[in-house]
Image: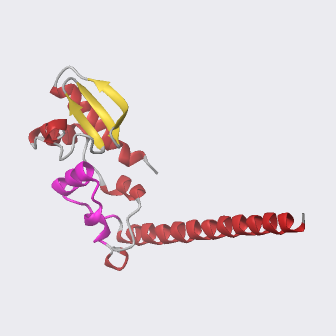
């Protein structure tokens, strides 16, 4: 019985340790992100050219924003900063996706692996696939409907934080 109590006590101590260390890690990360946001605020969020904004929205690559504050560029870039840097409209973004052939690139037959994670165009549907399993689907009638769905999904990045 004593051994059982000791084991339970050790398990509880380990659980408490992990909970506390996790909380400390999250706080440290949040503090770092706050510092990064403050550094961008001090810069008064310089305007990015439209092509850079369009590419950020398409790819999710925040490097152009990170490079504005070199001392933090390797620390990550909070997505909540997008609201201060993205000034393009959804219409401009949709037109860009159509003009650059984004929709064509999203056809599942163009994927390196048909089970590759992503949001793919499969005949008359857009599928959200992860590890070969489809999680969501959207029926589409034409390329305009497909582009509108992709624009809305990619635009959600602006509202993640």
Query: Magenta stretch: residue 135 in it?
Result: no
Q: Is residue 15 left or right of residue 108?
A: right
Q: What residue is rendered at 80% in x and 63% in y?
A: 8
Asked whether residue 60 is in view, the answer is yes
Q: What residue is rendered at 35% in x and 74% in y?
A: 74
Q: Is residue 100 left or right of residue 23?
A: left
**Front-most of residues 4 and 9:** 4
Where in the figure is residue 104, as x and y percent of width and height? Answer: 12, 37
Most extreme residue toward the bottom, as rendered? 71
Where in the figure is residue 105, as x and y percent of width and height? Answer: 14, 41
Q: Is residue 152 above or below residue 65?
A: above
Q: Is residue 114 above or below residue 29?
A: above
Asked whether residue 107 is in view, the answer is no
Quadrant in which residue 38 is drawn: bottom left
Where in the figure is residue 76, as x and y percent of width and height? Answer: 38, 67
**Front-most of residues 10 and 45:** 10
Q: Which residues are magenta?
A: 45-68
Query: Magenta stretch: residue 53 in it?
Result: yes
């Amino acid at each position: 019985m004593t051994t059982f109590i000791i084991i339970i006590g050790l398990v509880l101590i380990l659980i408490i340790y992990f909970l506390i260390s996790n909380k400390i890690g999250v706080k440290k990360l949040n503090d770092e992100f706050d510092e990064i946001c403050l550094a961008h605020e001090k810069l008064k969020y310089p305007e990015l050219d439209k092509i850079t904004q369009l590419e950020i929205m398409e790819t999710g690559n925040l490097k152009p924003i990170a490079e504005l504050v070199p001392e933090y560029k390797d620390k990550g870039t909070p997505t909540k900063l997008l609201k201060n840097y993205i000034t393009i409209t959804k219409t401009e973004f949709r037109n860009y996706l159509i003009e650059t052939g984004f929709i064509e690139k999203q056809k599942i037959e163009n994927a390196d692996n048909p089970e590759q994670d992503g949001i793919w165009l499969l005949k008359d549907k857009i599928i959200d696939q992860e590890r070969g399993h489809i999680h969501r689907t959207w029926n589409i009638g034409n390329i305009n409907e497909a582009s509108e769905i992709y624009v809305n999904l990619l635009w959600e990045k602006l509202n993640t934080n």
